[in-house]
Image (cartoon, helix red, strand yellow):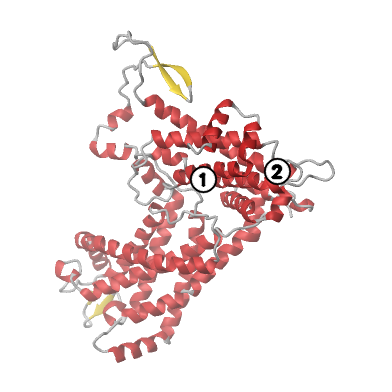
Amino acid sequence: MDGTIGDVYNKEVHRWRTGAAITWAVITVPIILSVYVTLAHLDVSHPSQWISGSLSLLFSVYYLLMCVVVIFLTGLWGSFSLPTFIVEPEVYSNPLQLTASMCSPQKLVFGVVCVLLSGVTSLLCTGILDGRYQDLTICTNRDFCVLNEHHLFLVTYGCYTGAVFYLFHFLRQNNYLQFTSLQQSKYFQVRSGILRVLQTSLHCVLWQTAYFYPLYWLFGHIPTEWIVHSLGLRRSTLPVDSVYGLLDLALLWQSVLCGLLVHISWSLTTLLIKVYITERFCFPIESMLDDRKNQCLIDALQCDQNPVVKYLGYLDLCLLSKHSPERRRTVFSLSQPGGHPHNWSKLSTSCLSAITALSGRIQDANWQVFSQASVRPATDDVKKSATSHQGSTLTYRGDSVKKDTTTPQPAKNGSSFWKTKPVISYFLTEFPDAKSRKLFASAQLDIWAVEALCNLVAASFREDNYGVVQKTLPQILTSVIKLQENVEKHLKLVSSGRRNGGRGSLDLPLKYVLHSSLKSCIYRIINVFGAHLLNLDLPSDTSYKLKLFMDFKE
């Protein structure tokens, strides 16, 4: 089959997975709707009438039509949400960048879709309730009609729910795909996530309702007056946007249920999409078919066109290095004819490139942080003066580097001028630890690369019959130890306790997981090879660091 591995994955795997996720999501809609209808007609004082009335309503024609429409809306929302899912968490430098990202055309279109679909869902909900909420107008006599503000309140609340869900989808990183090396069945993942979906949905609905009521009290007259003047209606004697009108507990109950219906159905759809997309996919290590030559594991590791394929490739490599002796044997095999370790060379080169690239970025960031710190003058007899051009000495990784510490007077540019304004300065102020979080946003790939390499190296002690790993073992040890040293120095230089205001950000643990994975992988290699590692041709700093690990001083 022609085409890149990204195109083939989209056609043969991604469409089926997302289709199955959305299908299961719409199957749950009748169950959620039946619970909603039962609770919406709750009558504790007359339980028998409540149960009989709910059962008769569940078998009515309107309920069946409502199920069909809500199923269509849920499937439509799931289809529109697919392009919003990401494999790397979004990290913003300041509130201005966050605001600009939320106002991007793609996200704004998704926000409009959320508002419209949620509004239509709430409109359908009003039709299944009592006469108090069903119609927009109430005709008292032949002369005039009165605006049904309870109906308008629920529809407005539904649109507001869609806007809140749109914000939470991105601000709380609900669109972030978390891959895990601990593989579980889809049924178990969904079952364990349902309780979290219910708790999160209830918390979000209560939070948004607490803010919607004062907002509607302040601005609820705007849509009300516009509809009244446009349709020639009259307002009721007890408007809902008054303090007394908002104290209606029945209206509060219906609003909360409507919000829960939207949040639970869409959050459950999100959960199913995540479970299906992040499921492990086994790529072939090599292929004997010509039309499948560019669809192997190495192609997945280098697939920058489709990040999901790249993440699934590194996940598959990490898992095969731990649990697949037969596939490891293929990695260690030699090509026929020729006898070259092409599989190992390609896979190790790809992993080492990712590790080296991250190590270089961290080292540059460490230099930047280190250079911003106060430095000791190179000589003790240097006189401090505003016009001094004397350099200072920085020491990093054992090397002394001459650095010019001249501090010219900063020019008064536009950026510094706007930063003096109170409101604008808030949007231009950088989030704490934003640079560090951006640095490790893609660290999950490097965690898998390090674990895969070290597991394959440890397994090669018994399974590598041709010695293909031993040639690259010095390079692997040097790269992993250098990365471990840079990460450790970065954690010491950058404050680890500061956050950017987004509580519970999912990218925060990545640098600590990387740090612990590096140490455990180095110890795993030492436990297998032992003192034989000292016979390798390693750089002096790598040998020194390796000796510290052997003596358990790291």
**Residue 358 appears anywhere in the view:** no
Q: Is residue 4 left or right of residue 26?
A: right
Q: Position of residue 241 (x, y in %)?
A: 19, 66
Q: Nearer the viewer, mark 2 or mark 1?
A: 1
Q: Pointer 2: residues within 10 angstroms few (<14), some, or many (20+)?
A: many
Foreground pick, 221 / 371: 371
Residue found at x 66% / y 60%: 12
Q: Pointer 1: residues within 10 angstroms few (<14), some, or many (20+)?
A: some
Q: Position of residue 281 (x, y in %)?
A: 62, 58
Residue 517 numbered mark, or none: 1
Give the amino acid type for the residue marked by disc 1 in the picture: Ser
The image quadrant of residue 123 is bottom left
Residue 344 numbered mark, or none: 2
In the image, residue 33 sits, relative to residue 243, either above or below, namely below
Residue found at x 62% / y 29%: 538
Give the amino acid type for the residue marked by disc 2 in the picture: Trp
Decide which of tag 2 and tag 1 comes sooner along the chain: 2
The image quadrant of residue 403 is top left
**Residue 260 appears anywhere in the view:** yes
